[in-house]
Amino acid sequence: MIHINKNYLKLQDSYLFSTIAKKVADYTTKNPDKKVIKLGIGDVTLPLANACVEAMKKAADEMGQKETFRGYGPEQGYDFLREKIVENDYKKRGVNIEKDEIFISDGAKCDTGNIGDIFGVENIIAITDPVYPVYLDTNVMAGRTGEYNKQNNKFDEVVYMPVTAENNFIPELPKEKVDMIYLCFPNNPTGTVLTKAELKKWVDYAKREKAIILYDSAYEAFIQEENVPHTIFEVEGAKEVAIEFRSFSKTAGFTGTRCGYVVIPKELKVEEVVNGQKIEVSINNLWNRRQCTKFNGVSYITQKGAEAVYTEEGQKQIKENINYYMENAKIISEGLKEAGYEIFGGKNAPYIWLKVPKQYTSWEFFDYLLENANVVGTPGAGFGPSGEGYFRLTAFGTRENTKEAIERIKNLK
Ligand code: PLP
């Protein structure tokens, strides 16, 4: 008799974006004359940089010619892209990463979700609360958590690290023993970043506790301030304890094109006892084995598009787009402050995390904004229990909509 993976039954329905979509659909059906502005979901609105489009067109032409056609590519990604990453994302920041420590993928969602394949189910995971939901749900699927506890809205056997205004949205080192620590900076949803000194505490902790840090740096390109590390590998010793996830999605508008990468240094080794014998296992080798078995690489055309991000023209164009979004972030932050809201984030990240007025829960505030300003955001409670009392607005809208949304919110008061 066939059995299912019962861990899937532990999953809580992700009500967040479907509930938002339903509420917005109900509202617009009842109020067809209202123009609803969506600053909720984290998708980009600007088109791909022209340099990327042209590179992909050229690559598509190559695929149509006998002489330049390519079939299966390397599972780890083409060297031309891995080399550009080594040079631009690491060497220019003083970090030495080798080409075979980089694995090109179809995005950070898949990578952060799949990485669990190579780690034991007995490991204890630590996540921030609130958090990008993929880290938690993929561990539930893998059986690395207990049951969902309705009393505290948390999964048993998971270490939640609250990040709230009380600790400046900086997680404290866990008091319990943990093995896999998920960190995301610049953070979704709070928009927080860590300084190098703060990040070093985590690297030291992981070394001491023989834990691993899974560092999601999908929003690295939005860092504006000095003294904010662009990669965890700027921290001494991080190569022995960390895996870094990167994405072209928000950096270069690849949310629909799909390309990202993961960096697994060769220094990252785990001691394991097999048949009574202590062995040292290379995580890079393990992931390579996993990818070669389960993944057939990202298309040549897409990787050519990603490569163009690193050309002079590509860099100029993606920076213009990032500046555009960060200008939106400024408009949101300043407008909300003027309207009397307490706000966080928005300086090194495309997310503004605001404190919901005391009389509302985050879902009640969602309804209030939808009905009174026709603006859609994301209730903090959707990202974890400690997100209650907060609300996320994104800077990924158009300038016109962003300005109008903020004017409407200001006029509410
Ligand atoms: N990591 C974080 C923190 C995100 O917010 C997102 C997308 O919103 C992703 C990863 C997914 O990135 P990708 O589009 O590369 O799968």
Image: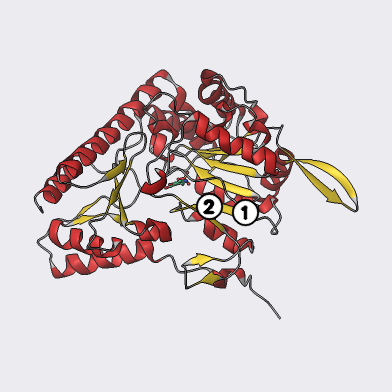
Pick the residue in front: 293 or 368: 368
- Mark 1 is on which residue type? Glu
Q: Say if residue 262 shows up in the picture.
A: no
Mark 1 nearby-residue class (10 Å; few <14, some 14–19, many ≥20)? few
User: Up-down: is 248 above or below 24?
Assistant: above
How many marks overall? 2
In the rendered view, tell whether residue 277 sits above or below residue 81: below
Q: Residue at x 57, y 49 (%)?
A: 174
Circle 1 sits on which residue?
Answer: 176
Could you tell me residue 139's position as x and y percent?
Answer: 59, 58
Residue 248 located left or right of residue 17? right
Q: In this view, does 380 lie above or below 167?
A: below
Q: In this view, does 74 lie to the left or right of 87?
A: right
- Say left or right for 259 vs 338: right
Q: Mark 2 points at which residue?
A: 127
Secondary-structure class at tag 1: loop
Percent position of residue 24, x then y: 24, 63
Q: Residue placed farthest to the right in the image?
A: 276
